Amino acid sequence: MSLTHEASRESANSTPARRPRNGRPPRRGAETRAGYAFLAPWLLGFITLTAGPMIASLYLSFTNFHPIRDWGWVGFDNFTRLFDDPRFMDSVQVTGLYAVVGTPIKLAAALGVAMLLNNRRRGQGTYRSLFYAPSLIGASVSIAIIWKAMFNDQGIVDEIGQFFGMKPGGWVGNPDMTLPMMILLAVWQFGAPMVIFLAGLKQIPNELYEAAEVDGAGPLRKFFRITLPMLSPVLFFNLVLETINSFQVFASAFIISGGKGGPANSTLFYTLYLYQRGFGQGQLGYAAAMAWLLVIVVGIITLIFFKTSKYWVHYGGETR
Amino acid sequence: MSFKKTALRGLAIAAAGSLALTACGSDGGSSDGGNVTLKFTWWGGDERASRYEQAIDLFEDQNPGIKVQTSFAAFPDYWTQRSTDATSGELPDVFQMDASRLLEYAGSGLLLGFDDYAGNQLDTSQIDAELLSSGEANGELVAIPTGTNTLTLMYNPDLIEELGLEIPDWDYTWDEYFAFLSEVSAAGADHSPRVYGANDPTMVWWLFMQHLVQQGIEPFSETGELNFTEDDMREFIDSAASLRSPDNQIFPAERVEQLDPLGGFTNGEAVMEFHWDNFIHNYSHDLDSDNVQLMPVPSGADGQKHMFFKPTMQLSMGANTKHPEEAALLVDFLINSPEAGAIIGTDLGVPASAERLDALEIEPGSLNERVIEYQQKARDEGYMTATVPFQPEGFGAVETEYVEVLAKEFDFRQIDTDAFVQRWFSEAGNHLVR
């Protein structure tokens, strides 16, 4: 209201809108130049640090590039070799499982906590910061180390597990338990999607809930009939973002497995294997091929999300 | 302050910052006011690092114009870092080299030859000619061996005694070794923590090399051809099959993961482990006990051991070094200086330099004495009958495939012997340059 008020006052007092404020005629060329000048640092960075390396890596993916040895063009050899490589298949499986299981759990946790924090209460800001904190520090090396210690033999998780009758020995050395551990570590860092969900929840008009209550809807019904549909654009955004993120997990796996993807390939994430092939074994052409395959697969998955989104994502004011 | 002023100041700071960065980039190993900074890296643990650091301090005291920037890493990470360095043409001035990588680096012109410096800054006359030739590639001296080592079975006498067992005879066979591992596993079952004999010996690449040599097979030809077959490898791995099933009598893979970076032996949960004899320093440090003893490897089918000396860590100069003379001086100090020798001891193997070996004061009962005596005894008893297997280009990569990749999957029983052998041979095709 104040905005329109001020706007109307300005239009009443000021000179006609066409005329520039300082009275001089506009200088189109200078403005464009200034625009490009301000854009230049980003453009330079984009060309030298993103686009250039991408083109180079596409080229390298068709060679057997090695940092030390002679190398040359090998065509599609790298791509065909990938599918005969059992460790590549392991890494696809680990990453796929991590994305398919981890992402929904993480989003559910983020949404659940966001709904709890949505209601006004005392110390609300503190709670929000506390729940967001893991995302700020979660990707750091120190947390991965602490996480490993917690889940190792005689770590706190192991002690608690034994109290409840679980077999001692920790999760770190057990190939069946390392992936759940990595998923937990990811889920625990739900802060970023949580904040986005919170913003989304604030947008839902309270009138809808009031109306539903008058009609006798319970909490479950309100959640599925109002909250979820109204949140669907936000949910879509988070889903795309988190899926892409989960395909790119690297740092935590690198620290926890000491860069080896162990035990027994159970944390051999796609990016970790790519790193091993490229920098550990010097097969940079092979690694480049893996990177491009990842780009293509993530692209396809994102495309599928966008294509199917029209069936479940509802935008305000949309008519069907 | 006006906006314009702030913006200008920001720009000035950014410009200064980027100038400083470029300066760092190009100045990494060059002089500042007459001083020279050398980069020196090695692989190894904390124990070796503290020895090297002490020696470097001494070098800097003796050569006031030279500063040495040091760094170190574990063996696999170390080579990852060096191959990245090589790609960007920024190899350290001086770095530890291994025979398994020597031909790969030398063949691509990444190493600076010592020929111009030997006799000037660097004295190579104290090194046995045959040992020195292990650092040659294409007729040029590109790596200086620091010493020699040989394979050994390290054991923990205190723990063996605690279990009420006696170690096998000094002149034991593979069968006797496997039988002893079973005994330890049975005796250690009630011990807290549970004690095992050792890791799976067939998952150690160099024991496979030793096994082949005992069969009279030279593993690789000089052109990188394999002189052994899939059956040779299968037979070696299956020789320990009785230790794996029906009962597991080998140090469990899960526990290895939990203890990392320590191992079963260094955590006092396994009584023995095969390694190079100079690792006694690191192992004794990690185990926190001086009582680590050495045994030779088990005898082969003909009752002979056919052991060999391997040139240990070598020192090389990166071809991109801007200060070859100072770098050669550092190599000379690390190889020949009696003071450096006193600090490093036999951590890099029994010293290659005769002068330094003579100057080494060996305290009775010390780890140094044990390594030197072990090598002497093995020599006296006629165990050292073979030469070190030839390590062709790609040797390091196929070793990594064996011990880092396939052995891990095998230890967790995810692949069987056949899959192990088949996958190793298929990867060897990618790594070995023929």
Image (cartoon, rainbow, N blue to C red):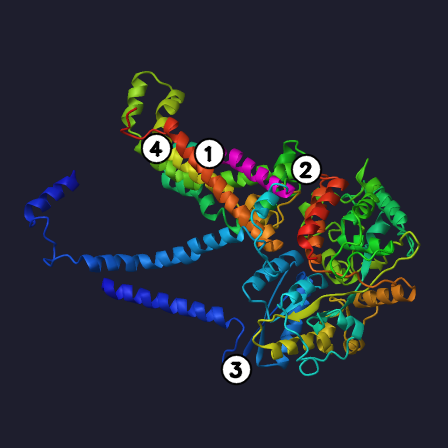
Q: CA distance from mark 1 to mark 2?
A: 28 Å
Q: Is residue B345 above or below residue B77?
A: below
Residue linked to disc 3: B34
Residue linked to disc 4: A201
Which residue is at 57% across, 45% downward?
A79
Type of residue at label 1? Ala
Q: Earlier in the sequence, mark 1 or mark 2?
A: 1
Residue placed most toward the observer, B226 or A273: B226
Q: CA distance from mark 3 to mark 2?
A: 61 Å
Residue B336 sits in which quadrant?
A: bottom right
Q: CA distance from mark 4 to mark 2?
A: 43 Å
Question: In the rendered structure, which segment of residues is drawn in magenta?
Answer: A85-109
Residue B320 sits in which quadrant?
A: bottom right
Element class at badge 2? loop
Residue placed most toward the observer, A174 or B239: B239
- Residue A82 horizontal side relative to residue B293, left or right: left
Type of residue at label 3? Gly
The answer to whether marks 3 and 2 sit on the same chain is no
Comparing labels 1 and 2, the label whose residue is closer to the camera: 1
Comparing labels 1 and 3, the label whose residue is closer to the camera: 3
Q: Is residue B95 above or below residue B221?
A: below
Residue linked to disc 1: A109
Chain on which label 4 sits: A
Residue linked to disc 2: A168
Q: Is residue A287 above or below residue B151?
A: above
Which residue is at 85% across, 64% downward?
B374
Residue A108 in magenta? Answer: yes
